[in-house]
Amino acid sequence: MQNIAAITGGAGGIGEACAVRLIEMGWTVVLLDRDAAAAATVAARLGCLSYAIDVGSRDSIEAAADFVEREVGPCSGLIAAAAIFENPHAPEDQDPEAWRAILQTNIDGTYWTATAFGRRMVERKRGSIVTLGSMVGMNSSPLFAYGTSKAAIASFSAGLAVAWGRSGVRVNCVSPGPTLTPALAASYARGERDPVARLRFTALGRQVLPEEVANVIAFLMSDQASAVTGVELPVDGGIMAAQLWSLYGGVPGAT
């Protein structure tokens, strides 16, 4: 049986890495992204289709789900990776428009995407969905809108896992830590973040790569994870595990 996956945010970063990995595993992939030109470029390189979407629009997502089914076939996999990030700030300095934009893209977008593709999987009694949370959503941080949105995604995903589990649809949430995507690399280059300081609080002592996050997501999408659903799985290089070590002299080997 052919495995077909749709990937939102598929034009770059973790979404693109997921597309590469799934294609290596024999999946047929459709990239969904608001940047139509970038998605088309990546799709041409990978030999797959792309489709321009606005994840904050239910109509746009429904049209994308119809497109995938019409042009490719029944979708048995979904990776909801589209998201908006933000820079650290004080809570009283939160821009209301930015707050709404982040929640609309991250929460509403995940909701519309998961339900549009998921209900079709429920009808066919087969499917796997992976949403993208964040380490930030599992703890406190000065990323108030982003953290709120990612915590909501994790809770929503667990609820879907129970609601759809007996219909043959698994839903899991992968929550990365800082991942060396092109966007993060550009942030380092602009001096907005300090990569050396971050490594002091990472058990592995190095940056996590998009391909490493994609490997975990691909596993959860596959039949090898057939008994795994309702899980939030951090892929953070051990940052959360190392949090309290700062109280006891720091992570061994860190400088």
Image: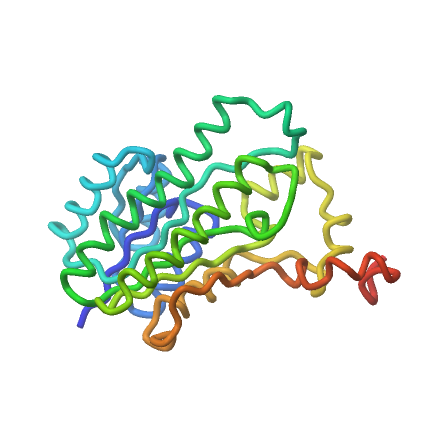
Q: Quadrant of the C terminus?
A: bottom right
x and y percentages locating residue 192 in the rendered image: 68, 34
* Quarter location, residue 251: bottom right
User: Quarter of the image holding residue 119?
Assistant: bottom left
Nearer-the-camera pick, 87 or 90: 90
Seen at 71% across and 59% down, the residue is 202
Q: Position of residue 134 (x, y in %)?
A: 53, 51
Q: Where on the picture, by quarter, is residue 231?
A: bottom left
Residue 234, compared with residue 110, is above or below; it is: below
Quadrant for the N terminus in the image: bottom left
User: Picture coordinates of residue 171 (x, y %)?
Assistant: 35, 61
- Residue 94: x and y in percent read 59, 25
Residue at the (23%, 52%) spot, across then down = 117
Residue drawn where x is 44% and y is 58% of the image:
173
As drawn, the residue found furthest toward the right would be 249
Question: How many numbered marks, from 0 up?
Answer: 0
User: Would residue 120 appear left or right of 103 to someone viewing this image?
Assistant: left
Q: Nearer the viewer, residue 233 or 40?
A: 233
Q: In screen coordinates, is 223 left or right of 252?
A: left
30 and 198: which is toward the camera? 198
**232 left or right, relative to 75:** right
Which of 231/127 is in front?
A: 231
When the figure is inspected, residue 241 is found, relative to residue 10, above or below; the finding is below
Q: Is residue 226 above or below residue 240?
A: below
Is the image coloured rainbow, by chain, by secondary structure, or in one colour?
Answer: rainbow
